Image: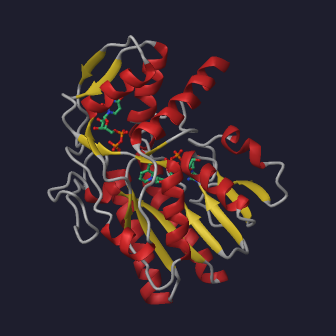
Amino acid sequence: MRILVTGGAGFIGSHLCGRLLREGHEVICLDNFFTGSKRNIARLFDNPGFELIRHDITEPILLEVDRVYNLACPASPIHYQYNPVKTIKTSVMGAINMLGLAKRVRARILQASTSEVYGDPQVHPQSEEYWGNVNPIGIRSCYDEGKRVAETLMMDYHRQNGVDIRIIRIFNTYGPRMAVNDGRVVSNFIVQALRGEDITVYGEGMQTRSFCYVDDLVEGMIRMMECEGFTGPVNLGNPTETTILEFARRIVALTGSKSRIVFNELPDDDPKQRQPDISQAKEKLGWQPQVDVETGLKKTIDYFASLLAEG
Ligand code: NAD
Ligand code: UDP
């Protein structure tokens, strides 16, 4: 098949492009390089099945493809809050443009949504039936509400125009090829630990997250794209939950770092708890994470250690 991956030069997108090429597909990677990099996809340039298009998905584009994975959108709070208007345009106009393309060429389209559609959840763990608790006017809204509208657009193009859609709600995912300056907790803590800098826990570190290794996520994405008769939304994540303080201590231990843990101000609207209920993914896709956090973190630490050693 010919497969379009928007946001393909980003962290998750680059892993997905690699995996799809290994399976023998042609891959078109579309990216505007806001948070992605050529370095992430450099090893793919030699593959004759790989094509790169520098394009912004807020603008329409015409391509003949069989599948669209719509991942283009900054995912780290510091990056999506840098230009919030652009963030919401990317989710909303990007979804409209990609759905228009999918409709025209009869491609199947998968939207990368997020656990952020649950906001600061009052139901724990979060299952797909939960409608969420999102602040519509806060600093995270450009991302959360943009993704919620993207889900709405997917469902309406499906009901109104018969577009073949899939929606996944990704929970915190980590692994090699996160950017050093990404700003999310896993890369921040590992880079700080490796450099011997203070580890910046926001708030008291009692908020929880559940971290999924990127290879597991990519497996779930492909299973969802290729399953029949199920549009989702489906949660994809690792249900192992940890407080951020525990997580910081774990990274200090795994890196053998001398870094101190310090406590900084908690950003507005930071969700207090997050854990996916993955019963649907298990039942409909036969999917569950295989990589435990210790193994995944070691691989990620090795990646950052060699990156920092290069200078
Ligand atoms: P990332 O920032 O590494 O990747 C996003 C990619 O999209 C980058 O390559 C960026 O340059 C590109 N992009 C951004 N705006 C664009 C635009 N207007 N036009 C074209 N390209 C654009 O983030 P990631 O972690 O790889 O996330 C990928 C997707 O998965 C995002 O849609 C994100 O919302 C979703 N997601 C990720 C997580 C996670 O934990 N990593 C969790 C939930 C959802
Ligand atoms: N966090 C932290 N220190 C950091 C970066 C993040 O304590 O240097 C916290 C953040 O406040 C949040 C959690 O870690 O509670 C996860 O943050 P991240 O930005 O990775 O993802 P999200 O909040 O979108 O889940």
List x then y, in percent, for residue 274: 25, 50
Looking at the image, is 305 positioned above or below residue 111? above
**Total numbered badges shown on the rendered structure:** 0
* Residue 48 vertical position relative to residue 167 in the rendered view, above or below: above
Q: Which coloring applies here?
A: secondary structure
In percent of the image, x 24 and y 21: which residue is there? 263
Is 23 placed above or below 80 here?
A: below
- In the image, 5: left or right of 221? right
Q: Is residue 66 left or right of residue 184?
A: right
**Does the rendering let one see residue 163?**
yes
Image quadrant assignment for residue 149 = bottom left
Give the residue displayed 41% in from the left and 45% down from the top. Answer: 292
Q: Quadrant of the N terminus?
A: bottom right
Viewer-proximal residue, 140 or 48? 48
Q: Is residue 311 visible?
A: no
Image point (61%, 50%), residue name: 15
Query: Which one is in front, 292 or 251?
Result: 292
Q: Which quarter of the image is occupied by the C terminus?
A: top right
User: Which percent across, then down, holds residue 48?
Assistant: 85, 58
Where residue 50 appears, as percent x and y from the top left, is: 78, 57
> How far from the left and from the top, in percent, is residue 115?
33, 56
Q: In the picture, residue 271 is in which quadrant?
A: top left
Ligand 2 - quadrant of the structure image = top left
